[in-house]
């Protein structure tokens, strides 16, 4: 059961180069600039402070495919809350998971537990991944380095790749549609929250829509671990807010 309770950890849910950087490094920045422009531009994104989202999806857990709905509350850089309702064998289980800076809790079936250091550390690693895939931090965080990965394909779609590196963080490879410049895939190392094994995780982004005014975002995601589907998500609604009340990120009762 505890493995099921950490479901939200993977869901809870954005550069500069040296003056003497080689030409191909500059090309990586051009790719990112085009991608940011394609989804609505940096100025619009920088005005957004916090978010709520309604999500539905399916997760593969211990040989079962479980449907769930998720209400997410996010306030970067370190606060998030997920209220998950999951169907387990026809029974509804509600899971509440909160991350508040260096603390975290999970609540289910009337029990509340503090999250262990391993889970908190992995959550922080995934926050970095989400920051990279949002793209905007790539223009703000001077410690992030961009390198070209060349051309390849995601499915049948030609893409151009960019690797993002930062000291002390996991590398993230990004793949952009050559025509639309939209992000189609991210690839990185992760810890599977159920097996606790390190995996090669990839996120596939599809069906871009104007989920926030002026910003085109992927409404669907598929998450694969070592080539096998682990989860799929569909964003039903996303709403920007100035900030969440502090009580949202308090320890669940």
Image (spheres, rainbow, N blue to C red):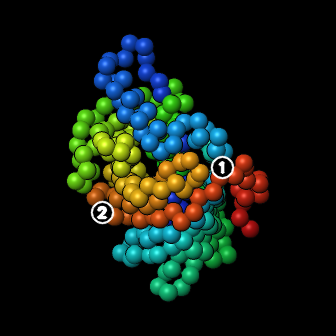
On the image, the x and y values in percent for residue 194 come to 43, 64
Q: Residue at x 30, y 41 (%)?
A: 178
Label 2 neighbour load within 10 Å: few <14, some 14-19, many 20+:
few
Instruction: Report the front residue among 60 and 181.
Output: 181
Instruction: Report the front residue among 31 and 252.
Output: 31
Q: CA distance from mark 1 to mark 2?
A: 32 Å
Instruction: Report the front residue among 159 and 142.
Output: 159
- Left or right: 4, with 97 as reference point: left
Q: Can residue 121 be seen at all in this image of the molecule?
A: no
Q: Can residue 57 be seen at all in this image of the molecule?
A: yes
Q: In the rendering, which numbered label is found on residue 106?
A: none
- Left or right: 1, with 155 as reference point: right
In the image, farthest residue toward the bottom: 90
User: What residue is disc 2 on?
Assistant: 228
Q: How many marks?
A: 2
* Res 112 quadrant in image: bottom right
Q: Residue at x 51, y 62 (%)?
A: 235
Discs 1, 2 touching: Cβ within 8 Å: no
On the image, the x and y values in percent for residue 233 come to 45, 64
| Callout 2 secondary element | strand
Q: Earlier in the sequence, mark 1 or mark 2?
A: 1
Image quadrant holding the C terminus, namely: bottom right
Q: In the rendering, which numbered label is found on residue 50?
A: 1
Q: Residue at x 57, y 63 (%)?
A: 237
Q: Residue at x 46, y 69 (%)?
A: 57
| Callout 1 secondary element | strand
Label 1 neighbour load within 10 Å: few <14, some 14-19, many 20+:
some
- Left or right: 115, with 217 as reference point: right
On the image, the x and y values in percent for residue 105 come to 64, 60
On the image, the x and y values in percent for residue 238 come to 59, 58
């Amino acid at each position: 059961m505890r493995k099921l309770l950490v479901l939200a950890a993977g869901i809870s849910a954005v550069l500069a180069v040296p003056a003497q950087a080689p030409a191909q490094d500059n090309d990586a920045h051009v790719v990112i600039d085009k991608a940011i422009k394609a989804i609505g531009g940096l100025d619009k994104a920088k005005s957004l402070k916090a978010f709520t989202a309604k999500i539905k999806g399916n997760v593969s857990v211990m040989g079962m495919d479980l449907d769930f709905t998720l209400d997410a509350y996010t306030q970067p850089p370190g606060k998030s809350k997920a209220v998950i309702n999951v169907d387990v064998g026809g029974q509804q289980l509600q899971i509440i998971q909160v991350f508040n800076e260096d603390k975290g809790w999970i609540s289910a079936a009337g029990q509340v537990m503090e999250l262990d250091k391993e889970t908190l550390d992995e959550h922080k690693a995934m926050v970095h991944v989400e920051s990279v895939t949002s793209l905007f931090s790539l223009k703000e965080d001077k410690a992030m380095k961009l390198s070209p990965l060349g051309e390849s394909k995601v499915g049948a779609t030609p893409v151009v790749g960019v690797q993002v590196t930062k000291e002390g963080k996991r590398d993230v490879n990004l793949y952009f549609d050559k025509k639309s410049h939209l992000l189609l895939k991210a690839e990185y190392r992760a810890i599977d929250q159920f097996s606790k094994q390190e995996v090669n995780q990839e996120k596939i982004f599809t069906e871009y829509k104007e989920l926030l005014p002026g910003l085109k975002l992927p409404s669907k995601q598929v998450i694969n671990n070592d080539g096998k589907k682990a989860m799929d998500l569909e964003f039903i609604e996303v709403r920007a807010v100035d900030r969440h009340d502090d009580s949202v990120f308090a320890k669940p009762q």
